[in-house]
Image (cartoon, rainbow, N blue to C red):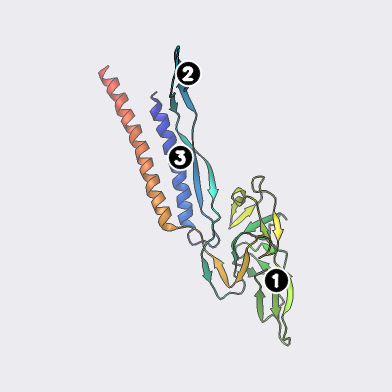
Amino acid sequence: MHPALWISKTGVDAQQTNIAVISNNVANASTVGFKKSRAVFEDLLYQTVNQAGGISSENSKLPNGLNIGAGTKVVATQKMFTQGNMLTTDNSLDLMIEGSGFFEVQMPDGTAAYTRNGQFSLDDTGQIVTPGSGYVVQPPITIPDDSTSITVSSSGEVSVQTPGTAASQVIGQLTMTDFINPAGLDPLGQNLYTETGASGTPIQGTASQDGLGSIRQGALETSNVNVTEELVNLIQGQRIYEMNSKVISAVDQMLSYINQNL
């Protein structure tokens, strides 16, 4: 079998994965706090016919080797944690992280998950939770029923104002969590990530301190997907897919010619 068939097949498979990654980015262009991904490619093993530096005669060496590649493959999908744009809202429970860091939430099994989506709501007990699944934000903060306003400072201090009191009452403190390698986090969907061996252990602290981002109330972080850039990447991936398919077609014609004329 002609090796170009298998080499081009790896190119087709790799571009299918690449286009799937791009399509997921485009589909989440309006998802609050979403971080785009990119496919990471790697060339495969080489067949070495002649080794560079090998002896070609008594007093000379080969300046170049003869190596035939075996194609390519996608080895990773890397999350890009660049800052998204700010979307101003009128909701006091909409919180945006300016800079590095994540909000921590508690999963149903008691484990911790992390999110950049600060589009929070209240449950039936007044606790601050995620809107889609109702996971409780950590540490748990309960808003009193008679609260007339909620204020969250840039450092994550939560205070409320109740009828009959002039001063605000501090009811809790949101913590910020960061990782040495955020790209190593495991995406679960629902805008949530979990710790892995590659991400490092969680580093907890107070917002606006020790290099952690600050919190802006009444704003949300939009997706960091650049639709124009993704469309360009899509066109490029499509063209590479077509070229690999063309190679397969060309090799098939070559083999067909040999079969018919020999």
The answer to which of marks 2 and 1 sits earlier in the sequence is 2
Q: Nearer the viewer, mark 3 or mark 1?
A: 1
| Neighbours of disc 3 within 10 Å: few (<14), some (14-19), many (20+) | many
Query: 76 left or right of 229?
Result: right
Using the numbered discs, state the Cα–Cα distance from disc 3 to disc 1 in whole angstroms: 47 Å
Secondary element at tag 2: loop
Q: Amino acid at mark 1?
A: Glu
135 vs 83, nearest the viewer: 83
At 30% from the left and 25% from the top, the residue drawn is 256
Q: Amino acid at mark 3?
A: Ala
Single out the residue that lies furthest toward the bottom.
164
Using the numbered discs, state the Cα–Cα distance from disc 2 to disc 3 in whole angstroms: 34 Å
Location of mark 1 (residue): 157
Label 2 close to label 1 by CB (< 8 Å): no
Location of mark 3 (residue): 14
Using the numbered discs, state the Cα–Cα distance from disc 2 to disc 1 in whole angstroms: 68 Å
Location of mark 2 (residue): 54
At 54% from the left and 73% from the top, the residue drawn is 89
Q: Quadrant of residue 136 in the image?
A: bottom right
